[in-house]
Image (tube, helix red, strand yellow):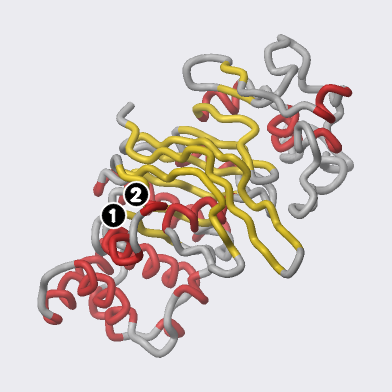
Amino acid sequence: MNVFLKIEGLTVEYRSGNRHVHAVNDLDLQLGEGEVLGFVGETGAGKTTTALSILRILPNPPAKVLGGKVIFKDQDIIQLSDREMRAIRGEEIAMIFQDPMTSLDPVKTVGDQICEMILLHRNCSKKEAWEMAGDMLETVGIDRGRAGDYPHQFSGGMKQRVVIAIALSCKPSLLIADEPTTALDVTIQAQILELMKELKKKYQSSMIMITHDLGIVAEICDNVAIMYAGGVLEYGSVMDIYKDPRHPYTRALFDSIPDVHRDQARLKVISGLPPDPTDIPSGCPFHPRCPHCTERCKTEKPEVVHLNETHWARCFLAQEEGRYEHE
């Protein structure tokens, strides 16, 4: 695998007065060329903060990168100047945000908003940019004649298509999608996911997909990072994670999905709550909620256990075969 994004020891903190929120803690990840990596976890796991760190658009203050590297195409973008980063942002790395309602400018036409991105990174005239904007709208399934319309004239699903058109207008090599289907109904979700799969194949982009939905991960991702309390507890291919989940948190996420083949009076839930990010537990961060917790888990942070070439977990019991059998 040709690795072209590598995160090493990334640590990000939000500061508010005397409170320090530990959003990302010593994170290590890598992304291969043409690969789709899914970030999965509960709210507050650090998924979006990691994505914003890659783009260097964390709010500062209160956010601060305390350490680590984000190596993109052999350069650490954490160390780049703002001017150098602006050349990468949008052209090389683009992001599809969660809510198209807040991503689009309500007083500009959608064509002008796509043109703005093109003119920022391409040496072309306004007329040429407008033609390209029309082409991008058609690429995402919208008639080019609607380039002069405003966001309020589009449905939620159409707005999300416009946001995708803006993100892809400069053909970036890395696309970050932050819960791109959350605000949409199920039918439109399926259409947007199918569109993203087609466009990824067309433009040969790598992608990071941030989601709570394990069904979306199975549909579109190659590899999966299970995130919790600012770190990754388990990583592997979709097949590894879905067929042989080894971390108790990963198992709990799967167990909480309703089983259509079983008659269940109540859904399974993960006991307890995600940790307070201002006070991350010692040892394994999942230990207060883990049914298999030992005294060692409470005091000692687990190291990575490699289960095969593509699959690893941070758990003392991960290598014990049969320990976590589904009920």
Identify the residue at image location x=42%, y=45%: 70
Q: Quadrant where the N terminus lies?
A: top left
Give the Cα separation between the discs numbered 2 and 1.
6 Å
Q: Nearer the viewer, residue 219 or 20?
A: 20
Identify the residue at image location x=61%, y=36%: 232
The image quarter in which residue 117 lies: bottom left
Task: Determine which of the numbered discs, if any, sits on residue 12 in the image.
Answer: none
**Amino acid, disc 2:** Leu
- Indicate the position of residue 137 as horizontal and vertical percent values: 28, 69
- Indicate the position of residue 68 as horizontal and vertical percent values: 50, 43
| Any part of residue 146 in sight | no
Dot 2 and dot 1 residues touching (CB under 8 Å): yes
Q: Nearer the viewer, residue 294 or 1?
A: 294
Identify the residue at image location x=51%, y=76%: 101
The image quarter in which residue 184 lies: bottom right
Q: Residue furthest bottom?
A: 107
Q: Quadrant where the C terminus lies?
A: top right
Q: Which residue is mark 2?
A: 174
